[in-house]
Image (cartoon, rainbow, N blue to C red):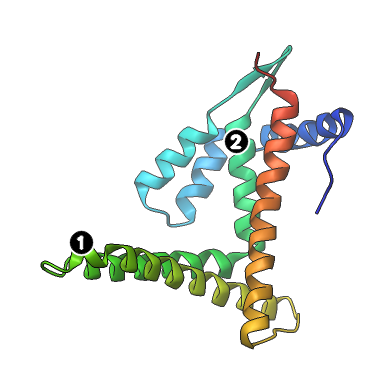
Amino acid sequence: MSSALSLPQANLKMALWQVNADSMSSSDLYVWLNDTDLPHEVTIRLHELATYTTKAGNKVLAVGKIILIQIIEFVKAHPNLVVGAGIGAAIGAAVAMLINSIPFLGPFLAPLGAALGLTITAFGAIAGHKLDQRDQGKDVSDGIVGIAQDIIEIVKAFFQLMIDVFNTIFCNVITA
């Protein structure tokens, strides 16, 4: 994990991200989103995110496009993790809805359904992470320790993405 960025480091990182964001036109980004076979509504919402900008000093930063590009890079680096979590979330939501729809007992079993849905999502993400590791030629450990290591690696990767984006952006955007 990286330590806190100094202001010059954050400015450099933000400048590099801004150059990357500027190199991809809005129409190119929209075409890429359409080519990923996402639902049209999701494509429109993500494209709206990409148009969000903010002013920092005398610079206009394409914050939405930067965040979207970072998410895209995360998905490209961990494709099976994302697919596994998505499939797990869909199955988990279906199981939770089925449990909640039980007459009379459903409302009482709702917390169990929610916990079961989250557990299924986590197992989907872990399975996807293991596939990503195998694709990268890494050793995959099984058992409780292996699952715990996978959870830790998934959480580290996701939150490192969030930390990098927020530290870099909020070092440049100061609100009073």
Q: Could you say where residue 137 lies in the image, as x and y percent from the top left?
A: 75, 81
Q: Residues within 10 Å of mark 1 (few under 14, many from 20)?
A: some
Q: Amino acid at mark 1?
A: Pro
Q: Nearer the viewer, residue 12 or 90?
A: 90
Please give left or right for residue 96 compared with residue 120 in the image.
left
- Give the vertical position of 125 relative to 41 (above or below): below
Please give left or right for residue 141 compared with residue 81 in the image.
right
Q: Could you say where residue 155 lies in the image, as x and y percent from the top left?
A: 64, 60
Residue at the image position 70 percent from the left and 44 percent from the top: 163
Q: Residues within 10 Å of mark 2 (few under 14, many from 20)?
A: many
Residue at the image position 43 percent from the left and 45 percent from the top: 43
- Of marks 1 and 2, the one in the foreground: 1
Q: Which mark is residue 85?
A: none
Please give left or right for residue 45 compared with residue 123 in the image.
left
Residue at the image position 57 percent from the left and 67 percent from the top: 81
State the quadrant of the C terminus. top right
State the quadrant of the N terminus. bottom right
Q: Which residue is mark 2?
A: 65
If you read the primary sequence from the N terminus, does the residue marked by circle 1 or circle 2 appear first?
2
- Give the vertical position of 110 relative to 30 (above or below): below
Please give left or right for residue 40 compared with residue 154 in the image.
left
Q: Are marks 1 and 2 in contact (CB under 8 Å)?
A: no
Q: Could you say where residue 157 lies in the image, as x and y percent from the top left?
A: 68, 59
Q: Which residue is mark 1?
A: 107
Q: What's the CA distance linking mark 1 and mark 2?
A: 41 Å
Q: Splitting the image into 4 quarters, where does residue 105 fall? A: bottom left
